[in-house]
Amino acid sequence: MQSAAQANEPSQAAGAAAPVLRAAGLSKRYGKRQVVDGVDLEVRRGDVFGFLGPNGAGKSTTIRMLTGLVRPDAGTVAILGHDLHRRPQQALARVGAVVEAPALYPHLSGDQNLAVLAALSGGASPERRREVLRLVGLEGRAHDRVRTYSHGMKQRLALAQALLPQPELILLDEPTNGLDPGGMVEVRQLIRRLAAEEGITIFLSSHLLAEVEQVCNRVAVIHKGQVLVQGSVPELLQAAPFVTIAATPLEQAREVLAGIAGVRVAATDSGALRVECDPGRIADLNEALVRAGCRVSALVPGRLSLEEFFLDLTGSHP
Protein backbone atom coordinates (compact mmCIF):
# COMPACT_ATOMS: atom_id res chain seq x y z
CA MET A 1 0.00 0.00 0.00
CA GLN A 2 1.29 3.44 -0.95
CA SER A 3 0.62 6.54 1.09
CA ALA A 4 -0.24 9.86 -0.51
CA ALA A 5 3.10 11.27 0.58
CA GLN A 6 4.98 8.35 -0.95
CA ALA A 7 3.00 8.53 -4.17
CA ASN A 8 3.83 12.23 -4.48
CA GLU A 9 7.56 11.55 -4.73
CA PRO A 10 9.06 10.76 -8.16
CA SER A 11 10.68 7.35 -8.37
CA GLN A 12 14.39 7.27 -7.69
CA ALA A 13 14.84 3.50 -8.02
CA ALA A 14 18.37 2.54 -8.90
CA GLY A 15 18.74 1.58 -12.53
CA ALA A 16 15.22 2.74 -13.43
CA ALA A 17 14.82 4.11 -16.95
CA ALA A 18 15.03 7.87 -17.19
CA PRO A 19 11.56 9.43 -17.26
CA VAL A 20 10.28 10.88 -20.53
CA LEU A 21 9.29 14.04 -18.68
CA ARG A 22 10.38 15.29 -15.29
CA ALA A 23 9.45 18.57 -13.63
CA ALA A 24 10.94 19.70 -10.34
CA GLY A 25 9.78 22.62 -8.23
CA LEU A 26 7.78 24.37 -10.96
CA SER A 27 6.28 27.62 -9.71
CA LYS A 28 4.46 30.50 -11.38
CA ARG A 29 2.91 33.63 -9.94
CA TYR A 30 0.71 36.16 -11.72
CA GLY A 31 0.58 39.33 -9.66
CA LYS A 32 -0.33 38.36 -6.12
CA ARG A 33 -1.74 34.98 -7.13
CA GLN A 34 0.44 31.88 -6.83
CA VAL A 35 -0.95 29.82 -9.72
CA VAL A 36 1.54 26.94 -9.55
CA ASP A 37 3.49 26.23 -6.37
CA GLY A 38 6.42 23.80 -6.36
CA VAL A 39 5.04 21.15 -8.73
CA ASP A 40 7.02 17.91 -9.14
CA LEU A 41 6.01 15.47 -11.89
CA GLU A 42 7.45 12.30 -13.40
CA VAL A 43 6.06 10.75 -16.59
CA ARG A 44 7.49 7.38 -17.57
CA ARG A 45 7.81 5.90 -21.03
CA GLY A 46 4.54 4.25 -22.08
CA ASP A 47 2.40 6.17 -19.59
CA VAL A 48 -0.98 7.63 -20.33
CA PHE A 49 -0.55 10.14 -17.53
CA GLY A 50 -3.55 12.07 -16.26
CA PHE A 51 -3.03 15.53 -14.76
CA LEU A 52 -6.18 15.91 -12.75
CA GLY A 53 -7.68 18.92 -11.05
CA PRO A 54 -10.63 21.30 -11.00
CA ASN A 55 -10.77 24.32 -13.28
CA GLY A 56 -8.39 26.95 -11.95
CA ALA A 57 -6.14 24.44 -10.18
CA GLY A 58 -3.08 25.31 -12.29
CA LYS A 59 -3.25 22.56 -14.94
CA SER A 60 -3.06 24.74 -18.06
CA THR A 61 -0.31 26.97 -16.64
CA THR A 62 1.72 23.87 -15.79
CA ILE A 63 1.30 22.46 -19.30
CA ARG A 64 2.38 25.79 -20.78
CA MET A 65 5.53 25.63 -18.66
CA LEU A 66 6.13 22.02 -19.72
CA THR A 67 5.94 23.03 -23.40
CA GLY A 68 8.03 26.19 -23.11
CA LEU A 69 5.13 28.57 -23.78
CA VAL A 70 5.46 30.09 -20.30
CA ARG A 71 8.70 30.49 -18.38
CA PRO A 72 8.46 29.36 -14.74
CA ASP A 73 9.49 31.65 -11.92
CA ALA A 74 11.31 28.66 -10.41
CA GLY A 75 11.91 25.01 -11.17
CA THR A 76 13.20 22.87 -14.02
CA VAL A 77 11.76 20.73 -16.82
CA ALA A 78 13.59 17.87 -18.54
CA ILE A 79 12.10 16.17 -21.60
CA LEU A 80 13.74 13.07 -23.06
CA GLY A 81 16.83 13.89 -21.04
CA HIS A 82 17.17 17.50 -22.29
CA ASP A 83 16.74 20.58 -20.12
CA LEU A 84 13.86 22.52 -21.65
CA HIS A 85 15.27 25.96 -20.90
CA ARG A 86 18.90 25.27 -21.80
CA ARG A 87 18.24 23.10 -24.87
CA PRO A 88 14.66 23.81 -25.99
CA GLN A 89 15.07 22.62 -29.58
CA GLN A 90 16.45 19.24 -28.51
CA ALA A 91 13.87 18.89 -25.72
CA LEU A 92 10.89 19.60 -27.97
CA ALA A 93 12.11 17.91 -31.17
CA ARG A 94 10.09 14.73 -30.48
CA VAL A 95 7.18 16.33 -28.64
CA GLY A 96 3.69 17.03 -29.93
CA ALA A 97 1.15 19.18 -28.13
CA VAL A 98 -2.41 20.43 -28.30
CA VAL A 99 -2.47 23.18 -25.69
CA GLU A 100 -5.02 25.69 -26.94
CA ALA A 101 -8.24 25.17 -28.88
CA PRO A 102 -7.32 23.87 -32.36
CA ALA A 103 -6.16 26.82 -34.54
CA LEU A 104 -7.32 25.60 -37.93
CA TYR A 105 -8.12 27.25 -41.27
CA PRO A 106 -11.79 26.45 -41.97
CA HIS A 107 -11.58 27.29 -45.71
CA LEU A 108 -8.78 24.72 -46.24
CA SER A 109 -9.03 20.95 -46.27
CA GLY A 110 -7.72 18.77 -43.48
CA ASP A 111 -4.66 17.83 -45.53
CA GLN A 112 -4.02 21.46 -46.51
CA ASN A 113 -4.19 22.48 -42.85
CA LEU A 114 -1.56 19.88 -42.01
CA ALA A 115 0.64 21.08 -44.88
CA VAL A 116 0.48 24.69 -43.65
CA LEU A 117 1.10 23.74 -40.02
CA ALA A 118 3.95 21.41 -40.98
CA ALA A 119 5.61 24.16 -43.03
CA LEU A 120 5.82 26.27 -39.88
CA SER A 121 7.74 23.55 -38.02
CA GLY A 122 10.11 21.93 -40.50
CA GLY A 123 7.72 20.34 -42.97
CA ALA A 124 6.21 16.89 -43.44
CA SER A 125 5.91 14.76 -46.54
CA PRO A 126 2.52 14.03 -48.17
CA GLU A 127 3.04 10.43 -47.10
CA ARG A 128 3.43 11.44 -43.46
CA ARG A 129 0.34 13.63 -43.67
CA ARG A 130 -1.67 10.72 -45.06
CA GLU A 131 -0.31 8.47 -42.30
CA VAL A 132 -1.34 10.76 -39.43
CA LEU A 133 -4.78 11.32 -40.97
CA ARG A 134 -5.16 7.55 -41.08
CA LEU A 135 -4.07 7.26 -37.44
CA VAL A 136 -6.77 9.69 -36.30
CA GLY A 137 -9.46 8.20 -38.56
CA LEU A 138 -9.76 11.15 -40.99
CA GLU A 139 -8.31 9.63 -44.15
CA GLY A 140 -11.76 9.65 -45.76
CA ARG A 141 -12.20 13.38 -45.04
CA ALA A 142 -8.67 14.54 -45.88
CA HIS A 143 -9.77 16.72 -48.80
CA ASP A 144 -12.95 18.14 -47.25
CA ARG A 145 -12.88 21.68 -45.97
CA VAL A 146 -12.48 21.91 -42.21
CA ARG A 147 -15.59 24.09 -41.93
CA THR A 148 -17.56 20.90 -42.64
CA TYR A 149 -15.91 19.01 -39.75
CA SER A 150 -17.61 18.32 -36.45
CA HIS A 151 -15.97 19.58 -33.26
CA GLY A 152 -14.69 16.06 -32.57
CA MET A 153 -13.16 15.82 -36.04
CA LYS A 154 -11.41 19.17 -35.53
CA GLN A 155 -9.99 17.85 -32.28
CA ARG A 156 -8.72 14.75 -34.08
CA LEU A 157 -7.17 16.93 -36.79
CA ALA A 158 -5.35 18.87 -34.07
CA LEU A 159 -4.05 15.55 -32.76
CA ALA A 160 -2.94 14.67 -36.30
CA GLN A 161 -0.92 17.88 -36.38
CA ALA A 162 0.70 16.94 -33.06
CA LEU A 163 1.63 13.55 -34.56
CA LEU A 164 3.44 14.99 -37.61
CA PRO A 165 6.95 15.04 -36.04
CA GLN A 166 6.62 11.36 -34.99
CA PRO A 167 6.66 12.35 -31.33
CA GLU A 168 7.67 10.17 -28.42
CA LEU A 169 5.57 12.36 -26.10
CA ILE A 170 2.28 14.19 -26.63
CA LEU A 171 0.85 16.75 -24.20
CA LEU A 172 -2.90 17.42 -24.36
CA ASP A 173 -4.73 20.12 -22.44
CA GLU A 174 -8.37 19.11 -21.82
CA PRO A 175 -8.56 17.04 -25.05
CA THR A 176 -12.31 16.33 -24.79
CA ASN A 177 -13.37 19.79 -23.64
CA GLY A 178 -16.57 20.85 -25.39
CA LEU A 179 -17.16 17.52 -27.12
CA ASP A 180 -20.46 15.71 -27.12
CA PRO A 181 -20.51 12.16 -25.63
CA GLY A 182 -19.80 10.56 -29.01
CA GLY A 183 -16.84 12.84 -29.64
CA MET A 184 -15.47 12.15 -26.16
CA VAL A 185 -15.57 8.41 -26.83
CA GLU A 186 -13.78 8.89 -30.17
CA VAL A 187 -10.96 10.90 -28.62
CA ARG A 188 -10.59 8.48 -25.69
CA GLN A 189 -10.33 5.54 -28.08
CA LEU A 190 -7.76 7.42 -30.15
CA ILE A 191 -5.63 8.18 -27.08
CA ARG A 192 -5.66 4.51 -26.07
CA ARG A 193 -4.72 3.45 -29.58
CA LEU A 194 -1.84 5.92 -29.88
CA ALA A 195 -0.40 4.64 -26.60
CA ALA A 196 -0.96 0.93 -27.24
CA GLU A 197 -0.22 0.68 -30.96
CA GLU A 198 2.14 3.58 -31.64
CA GLY A 199 4.05 3.47 -28.35
CA ILE A 200 3.55 7.18 -27.68
CA THR A 201 3.72 8.46 -24.12
CA ILE A 202 0.75 10.74 -23.43
CA PHE A 203 0.31 13.46 -20.80
CA LEU A 204 -3.21 14.84 -20.62
CA SER A 205 -4.87 17.30 -18.29
CA SER A 206 -8.53 17.03 -17.42
CA HIS A 207 -11.13 17.97 -14.84
CA LEU A 208 -13.28 15.01 -15.95
CA LEU A 209 -12.50 12.29 -13.43
CA ALA A 210 -14.35 9.48 -15.18
CA GLU A 211 -12.42 10.23 -18.37
CA VAL A 212 -9.07 10.03 -16.60
CA GLU A 213 -9.98 6.78 -14.85
CA GLN A 214 -10.90 5.20 -18.21
CA VAL A 215 -7.75 6.07 -20.15
CA CYS A 216 -4.88 6.73 -17.72
CA ASN A 217 -2.59 4.30 -15.93
CA ARG A 218 -0.95 6.97 -13.75
CA VAL A 219 -2.23 10.29 -12.43
CA ALA A 220 -1.27 13.37 -10.48
CA VAL A 221 -3.83 15.44 -8.62
CA ILE A 222 -3.26 19.20 -8.52
CA HIS A 223 -5.26 21.45 -6.23
CA LYS A 224 -4.68 25.15 -5.62
CA GLY A 225 -1.42 25.00 -7.55
CA GLN A 226 0.10 22.08 -5.64
CA VAL A 227 0.38 18.40 -6.52
CA LEU A 228 -1.28 16.52 -3.67
CA VAL A 229 -0.50 13.01 -4.86
CA GLN A 230 0.74 11.06 -7.87
CA GLY A 231 1.07 7.40 -8.70
CA SER A 232 -0.63 4.54 -10.49
CA VAL A 233 -4.43 4.63 -10.48
CA PRO A 234 -4.84 1.15 -8.89
CA GLU A 235 -2.29 1.90 -6.14
CA LEU A 236 -3.87 5.22 -5.25
CA LEU A 237 -7.38 3.80 -5.10
CA GLN A 238 -6.31 0.71 -3.15
CA ALA A 239 -4.68 3.02 -0.61
CA ALA A 240 -8.19 4.02 0.53
CA PRO A 241 -10.17 0.76 0.82
CA PHE A 242 -13.55 0.57 2.49
CA VAL A 243 -16.24 -1.91 3.41
CA THR A 244 -19.99 -1.33 3.19
CA ILE A 245 -21.77 -2.74 6.24
CA ALA A 246 -25.50 -3.35 6.54
CA ALA A 247 -26.41 -3.75 10.22
CA THR A 248 -29.27 -3.00 12.57
CA PRO A 249 -29.84 -0.95 14.60
CA LEU A 250 -27.91 1.37 12.26
CA GLU A 251 -27.12 4.12 14.78
CA GLN A 252 -25.89 1.61 17.34
CA ALA A 253 -23.67 0.02 14.69
CA ARG A 254 -22.28 3.45 13.82
CA GLU A 255 -21.44 4.15 17.46
CA VAL A 256 -19.72 0.78 17.87
CA LEU A 257 -17.59 1.24 14.75
CA ALA A 258 -16.77 4.88 15.52
CA GLY A 259 -15.25 3.76 18.80
CA ILE A 260 -12.69 1.53 17.09
CA ALA A 261 -9.28 3.12 16.49
CA GLY A 262 -8.27 3.47 12.84
CA VAL A 263 -11.84 3.25 11.54
CA ARG A 264 -13.66 6.09 9.74
CA VAL A 265 -17.42 5.75 9.38
CA ALA A 266 -19.74 7.51 6.92
CA ALA A 267 -23.42 6.84 6.20
CA THR A 268 -24.41 5.87 2.65
CA ASP A 269 -27.58 6.66 0.75
CA SER A 270 -28.71 3.03 0.96
CA GLY A 271 -28.95 3.16 4.75
CA ALA A 272 -25.78 1.13 5.18
CA LEU A 273 -22.47 2.32 6.61
CA ARG A 274 -19.31 2.84 4.60
CA VAL A 275 -16.31 2.13 6.79
CA GLU A 276 -12.79 3.08 5.72
CA CYS A 277 -10.26 0.73 7.30
CA ASP A 278 -7.64 -1.89 6.58
CA PRO A 279 -9.39 -4.79 4.76
CA GLY A 280 -7.69 -7.19 7.16
CA ARG A 281 -9.85 -5.84 9.98
CA ILE A 282 -13.23 -6.74 8.48
CA ALA A 283 -13.61 -9.83 10.67
CA ASP A 284 -12.79 -7.73 13.76
CA LEU A 285 -15.50 -5.23 12.82
CA ASN A 286 -18.05 -8.01 12.42
CA GLU A 287 -17.10 -9.47 15.79
CA ALA A 288 -17.40 -6.09 17.53
CA LEU A 289 -20.85 -5.50 16.04
CA VAL A 290 -22.16 -8.95 16.96
CA ARG A 291 -20.77 -8.63 20.50
CA ALA A 292 -22.65 -5.32 20.84
CA GLY A 293 -25.91 -7.00 19.84
CA CYS A 294 -26.12 -5.66 16.27
CA ARG A 295 -27.45 -7.88 13.49
CA VAL A 296 -25.05 -7.83 10.54
CA SER A 297 -26.59 -8.73 7.17
CA ALA A 298 -23.77 -7.70 4.80
CA LEU A 299 -20.08 -6.76 4.75
CA VAL A 300 -18.99 -5.86 1.20
CA PRO A 301 -15.37 -4.81 0.53
CA GLY A 302 -14.91 -2.09 -2.08
CA ARG A 303 -12.61 0.62 -3.35
CA LEU A 304 -13.12 4.28 -4.06
CA SER A 305 -13.74 5.50 -7.57
CA LEU A 306 -11.26 8.09 -8.79
CA GLU A 307 -13.97 10.71 -8.31
CA GLU A 308 -14.52 9.70 -4.68
CA PHE A 309 -10.75 9.58 -4.09
CA PHE A 310 -10.38 13.08 -5.54
CA LEU A 311 -13.25 14.54 -3.54
CA ASP A 312 -11.90 13.01 -0.33
CA LEU A 313 -8.39 14.22 -1.08
CA THR A 314 -9.36 17.81 -1.87
CA GLY A 315 -12.23 18.10 0.60
CA SER A 316 -14.51 19.04 -2.28
CA HIS A 317 -17.57 17.01 -1.35
CA PRO A 318 -20.78 18.90 -2.18
Image (tube, rainbow, N blue to C red):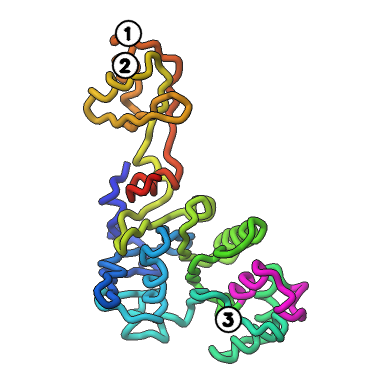
- Residue at which label 2 appears: 252
Q: Is residue 143 covered in magenta?
A: yes
- Residue at which label 1 appears: 293
Q: Residue at x 63, y 70 (%)?
A: 156
Query: Between tags 1 and 2, which lies in front?
Result: 2
| Pointer 1 with pointer 3, Cβ within 8 A | no
User: Which quadrant is home to the C terminus?
Assistant: top left
Residue nearest the viewer, comparing 311 with 285: 311
The secondary structure that most of the magenta stretch takes on is: helix
Q: Amino acid at mark 1?
A: Gly
Q: Secondary structure at mark 2?
A: helix
Q: Secondary structure at mark 3?
A: loop
Numbered circle sitting on residue 103: 3
Q: Is residue 147 covered in magenta?
A: yes
Q: Which residues are magenta?
A: 139-160
Q: Image quarter for residue 92?
A: bottom left
Q: Is residue 5 above or below residue 247?
A: below
Residue nearest the viewer, comparing 197 with 29: 29
- Mark 3 vs 2, N-terminal side: 3
Q: Residue 188 appears at what percent x and percent y?
A: 59, 59
Q: Residue at x 65, y 73 (%)?
A: 154
Q: Is residue 33 visible?
A: yes
Report, in whole angstroms, how far the alpha carbon at label 3 lies from the one at label 2: 61 Å
